[in-house]
Amino acid sequence: MRYVQYFIDAVALGSLYSLVALGIGLIFGVMRLINLAQGELLMVGGYTLFATNGWSVFVRVPLVLLVIVGLALLMERAFRRLRSAAPATMLVMTFAVSFLLRSIAQKRWSAQGKSMNIFSGLSHAFTVGQLRIRYVTLVSIAVGGVLLLGVNLFLNRTDIGLQMRAVASDRRIAQALGVRTNRVVVTAFALSGVLATAALLLFVPQRPTVTPDFGLQIAIVALIGVVVGGMDRLAPATFGGFSIGFANSMVFSLLPTGQRVFLDSVLYGLVIIVLLLRPQGLFQRERQTTRV
Amino acid sequence: MTGPARLELDGLHVRYGSVPALHGISIGVSGGEVVGIVGPNGAGKTTLLSAIMGMVSWSGGDIRFRGRSLTRCTPDQVARQGIALVPEGRQIFGDLTVDENLRLGMVARRGRDGVHADLEVVFGLFPIVHEYRHRTAGLLSGGQQQQLAIARALIASPDVLLLDEPSLGLAPAMIDIVFASLDVIRHSGRSIVIVEQRAQRTIAFADRTFVLAGGRIRAELGSTDAGHADLLRTSYFGPEAAAPEPVRRGVEARRAKRNHQTPA
Amino acid sequence: MLVLLAGGLSTVFSQSVQLKFHNAFVITAMVVCVYVSSGNSGVISFGHVSFVAIGAFAAGLFSMKAQQKGAVFNDLFPFIKDNHLGNLATLILAAALGGLYALVVGIALVRLNGLSAGIATFAVLGITRNVLRNWTKVGPGAKSIPGVEETTGLTQALMALILCIVVAYIYQRSAAGRRLRATREDAIAAQGVGIRIYRERLIAFTLSGAMAGFVGAVYVHFLGSVSTDQVYLDLTFLVLAMLVVGGVDSLWGATLGGLSISFINTLLSEGEKGLSLFRQKFTLPTSSSGIILAALMAIVLLTRPKGLANGREFGLRGFRRRDSI
Ligand SMILES: Nc1ncnc2c1ncn2[C@@H]1O[C@H](COP(=O)(O)OP(=O)(O)O)[C@@H](O)[C@H]1O
Ligand SMILES: [Mg+2]
């Protein structure tokens, strides 16, 4: 029974990371850019929540969505000029943006954690037999599932979704066919903003304090998941994000209490092993070649 | 849609960094005309088509379509004005289905009117595309992919169709199918610019053919000049170019490999 | 040229600000270390700060007096707790440990390319920090190592930097360095002429690990104390940013990027406290230095995507384009 409990918790955390990973994967797909500043979307959203503590959720949720998507679109403008630059240059550019946003947050709100609370009812738990399940666990799994399905439908059933896949596959040819690549890229950033919003709202019950580094930690873990899963395609990338969240929670539960401080080492060790065994990605088919 | 669909290259210069690739190319393509461009590997043929599509920028001269300059037009804008490209090495989207490839071809259409009629025409020309429309495009054979690439360009209903070495790497029977389809297309009133290394067939097919070498136009031929092609090749490219096929094999193989590796 | 620079600095800035510049020299030395591996091989590494950390912690712990260690860090292994080394010895130890660690890591990881290599080396950084922070037999735990002798002054920092540049230059001009650079330009062709790509990468990785360990020791002797947070994410990204802003494919780029950004960084953070420059007094608003620095880096990247050096390289006679080497 204990393991069922661990499993459910792990699936919930996995869902959250898969949302962030999908956002990273979408952007990488359309412009081959690894956005280290993805986490700052969550961070800025977090401070928005902090600043609006006590307001009605019907105002706060749209507001946070607006702020995060707006910031995602601003980032897109900043990265647009670098589309043909070397991968390392793009990476450092996104780091500069991340650093900039974190510096601003630090200046405005200091490094001290600020508490944000929304949907506090979600932290409550109910018991089924010996299982103790928090509502947020179920909601995370449900929202994660719905959003992943939604993005999948968007990509496969809409024209702009098809164009997005075409741009991810071959940007030059897609554009020569008349696809407005800028619009596609903007859409991908907006979509990743939506995903970041959902992830943020679901992260709040378990991490109710926002600091300037709040998002960086989440984004780095998600990014590692994306690379471990396989960057070149969305499904492996997303599933990689899920896996790292899942492994994070699972390893934490399984480690003896005194050894839990070594959680990171165990996880990173697993990451290295997976990368050595399958450098092209855990869930990637053989023939794929890495680009960068 | 303004003015007749005349495409005009006027003293076009293109350079890659400091290396020039085209030196003052002037070619006019009237509505409904078929223009061939032949020349050896590295002559600048692909560069020429890329410039028309807005995929590379030019350093001198101009390209005009319907009397308006295409300077500063992005490739998608060029495509939407009615110029479609069948790229070198086909470049279909290998991980999408045949149907999805066609849908992407429709992006550049001005309006959805007549889509069904055009699809009928395309499927009539290339029955295989219709038959395999639910398959993953990357699993088709080279010749089938080439048919798909032409179909994808046609479904945009372009006024000018640019083809970059459509016969590259195809079996002779496939080449016949491709040229037969082009023959039908020319009679629908579209202009065609076809780039080839196979001089004879191109010269015979086109209304006018330009010989391109080293980024310059070396000659202009009418379709009756086909018989003299070998002579011409020898005189313009030197004796080693008279039988270029074996030399090109390696290049083709490498190119095919590269296309295969492009992440899907 | 660097000596001139140091001389010039002393005329422009007041004494107190000058002292801060050895930070810039040490950080630039780290950029040069990363360059030796990443610049020459073309494979990015997020893991080099691990070697800096190992060097800094080893040097820090061994330069503490035994009884002092016994009082503060009782858990340490006896051989760490009971031994004390002189200044020079800690530098050598740090270089040796850094090199050894890089060798072990490199044997496993140099066969990776691209992003996989980036993430794997990042994982090494994560493990290093996690272990140093939580295994109190080898490190100070969440506390910092206090009271390390501050023997790194402006001169020592500059000497360390020059040493790193000289080693990097010699390596890059050596047969091994040329072989590695050939693999960067075209891995398949290089292997075709018999270059063993993993061996060459491992040499560079180990060498740069030893250099990084050494610089870590110099760093701790300048900071006076060190905690795991000081040699983790921010330092990693800052060093990489300097490398890329300068230009990742030349030693000159690495040096230029390191010096310019870390000088600006130093100036800005001094500026927050109030800075006299050419006898004028400036004061920046608090914690604005990070904002300005990040914005500056972004602007450089947008306007010069290939970096400040743009492929140019140190040469015995002035600067030359990289391809002439
Ligand atoms: N992207 C590019 N960068 C630099 N040089 C190029 C590029 N593409 C083509 N070239 C050069 O331009 C010349 C013309 O190439 P291309 O137009 O592809 O010739 P063709 O299609 O006739 O074989 C060649 O010398 C080629 O090396
Ligand atoms: Mg060509």
Image (cartoon, rainbow, N blue to C red):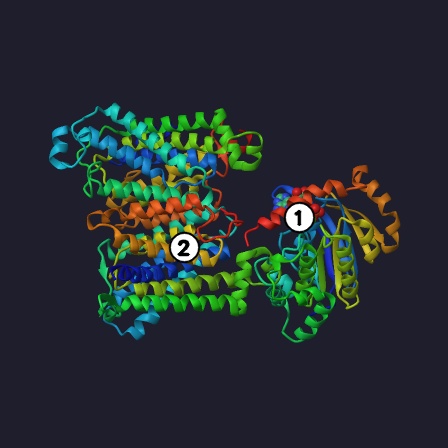
Mark 2 sits near ligand 1, with its Cβ under 8 Å away: no
Left or right, residue B102 beside residue C207: right
What amino acid type should be assigned to the residue bearing mark 1? Val
Relative vertical location of residue B183 with respect to residue C170 in this rendering, above or below:
below
Q: Is residue B196 something one can see in this rendering?
A: yes
Residue at 80 percent of width and 38 percent of height: B238
For the N terminus of chain B, the quadrant is bottom right
- Crowd around label 2: few <14 · some 14–19 · many ≥20 (10 Å): many
Residue B118 x/y as whole percent: 69, 71
Q: Secondary structure at mark 1?
A: strand
Residue at 82 percent of width and 57 percent of height: B205
For the C terminus of chain B, the quadrant is bottom right
Residue B183's tag is none
Mark 1 sits near ligand 1, with its Cβ under 8 Å away: no
What amino acid type should be assigned to the residue bearing mark 2? Gly
Mark 1 to mark 2: distance in Å? 44 Å
Residue B14's tag is 1
Left or right, residue B91 beside residue A241: right
Q: Is residue B74 something one can see in this rendering?
A: no
Tag 2 subunit? A
Tag 1 subunit? B
Query: Which residue is at the front of the view, C165 or C208?
Result: C208
Q: Where does label 2 land, which residue?
A: A240
